[in-house]
Amino acid sequence: MSTDLLNLIIVDDDAMLANSVKLMAPAGFKVFIATKPDLIPDHVFYHAAMVDMHILSKVGETPDGPAIISQLLKKNPQTEIVSMSGDLNRQNMEMAIKSGAARFLAKPLIAAEVTMILDKIMAYWQLRQVEYSNHKKTTLVGNSQAMEQVRKTVASLKGERSSVLIEGETGTGKDVIARLLAQQEGAKPFVTINCAGIPENLFESEFFGHIKGSFTGADQNKVGLCEAAHGGDLFLDEIEALPLSQQAKLLRFLETGEVKKVGSKESFHVDVRVVAATNQPLKQMIAEKKFREDLYFRISAHKITLPGLRERKSDIPDVAKFFLEKDKAKRNKQFDQEAFEALQAYEWPGNIRELKRVCEQLVLTSPLPMVRKEDVNRLLFSNGAPESADNIQLDQSLEAFINGQEKKFITLLLKQNNNIDQACNSLQISKSSLYKKIKDYGIVYE
């Protein structure tokens, strides 16, 4: 994480209040104070601003708060603006939002609230930092409007302990978002489990643990996932795969926070934030009686919906460069502009996961230090050119098209390397999920 300070400007004609806010600001902010609009330093890039809605340039003039907000955003549209006022009438608050403020604070200010908001603003700017050299730090790449909204949502959840549901197609990076949520909370436990890989008869043992001798094969005490995640996050990937019987047990835990190990008569409380992820429409599953509605409400206190890569094609060059930069210590490769255009012409049914695999293969197969359009097309398209409306079957549903592309993707991967373990690592899915897809699609890989 970058050690650079973020610049915060406090614009308020009450110098005492401005200085008290300066003391409230978390470490990591460099604070500027302007008691008049014309005292705002013009040469500084402001990451955040707190603006009094009723500050005046001169006595008797119209308040300059809305104008100051507009000017700050004109200079830098990404500045996070917090407006402040003791006048809580609706017109005043709506004027602040229309001027461009993201938040409105009521005076007198509450120190805890100021600190919390500034913490979330800091989290947002940290999410904008892309680190190519630190492989241990999870990074979110892309500056499209869709990804900016994802960043803001993730940052807004800093310090929140309610459950989070992450929705999105396969390969959109739901696990990345889960790690970012945990990462911004600091050094706390992060425990992850793929729900599709838990045998039904071992659910309670895996989640809640067991004591020695509680059943055949229990030759020692076992710490369950919920206990291991105490104080941190428990990430439940592919939660839609949980059978209804397991859903009921998970719901009881979410309602009470109580854990009782298999074979024990005593229960204990754990503090865990559950982050769940799904690539299936849970509301449709509820209608089909395949998912519990009460569990859905429990896990979706906050929701993050990830767009497919085809919905944010402007991010593809940045994401592709990020994957190549990760490998730069071993192989010095870069894309030319036409290669980026070729990547953007593809629909990416496998989303980010597929793009990552393609970039890894381009590093290995491109003969020149510069990855070219023909290198990309050779890898993506068997006929050397992207599919067009002339060779795509248009009388099919979107689901059928996506399933067809997924089948083609998995078939090609298994043909290149007939190893299930390596295929699971490349696809970042469990064995049970891969075997299910092989069965569903009728894929022959031996």
Image (cartoon, rainbow, N blue to C red):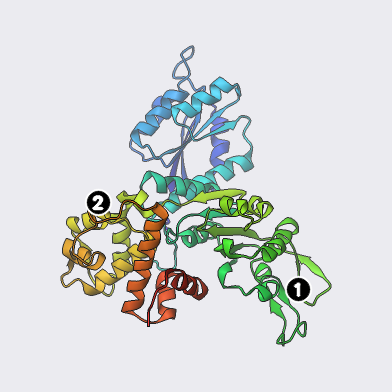
The answer to which image quadrant residue 135 occupies is bottom left
The amino acid type of the residue labelled 1 equals: Lys
Q: How many marks?
A: 2
The answer to whether residue 41 is above or below residue 310 is above
In the drawing, does residue 376 fall left or right of residue 268? left
The answer to which image quadrant residue 40 occupies is top left
The answer to whether residue 108 is above or below residue 90 is below
Would you say residue 80 is visible in this rendering?
yes
In the drawing, does residue 347 fall left or right of residue 102? left
CA distance separating discs 2 and 1: 57 Å
Q: Secondary structure at mark 2?
A: loop
Please name whichever residue, 130 or 392, is drawn nearer the observer in this view of the structure. Answer: 392
The answer to whether residue 247 is above or below residue 67 is below
Q: Position of residue 300 (x, y in %)?
A: 61, 51
> Are discs 2 and 1 less than 8 Å apart at CB?
no
Q: Position of residue 398 (x, y in %)?
A: 39, 52
The answer to which image quadrant residue 39 occupies is top left
Residue visible at 50% across and 47% down in the picture:
153
If you read the primary sequence from the N terminus, does the residue marked by circle 2 or circle 1 appear first?
Answer: 1
Residue reaching furthest to the top: 60
Image quarter of the N terminus: bottom left
Image quarter of the C terminus: bottom left
Residue visible at 26% across and 58% down in the picture:
343
In the drawing, does residue 152 fall left or right of residue 221? left
The residue where tag 1 is placed is: 261
The amino acid type of the residue labelled 2 equals: Ala
The residue where tag 2 is placed is: 389
Residue visible at 55% across and 49% down in the picture:
303
Please name whichever residue, 293 or 11, is drawn nearer the observer in this view of the structure. Answer: 293
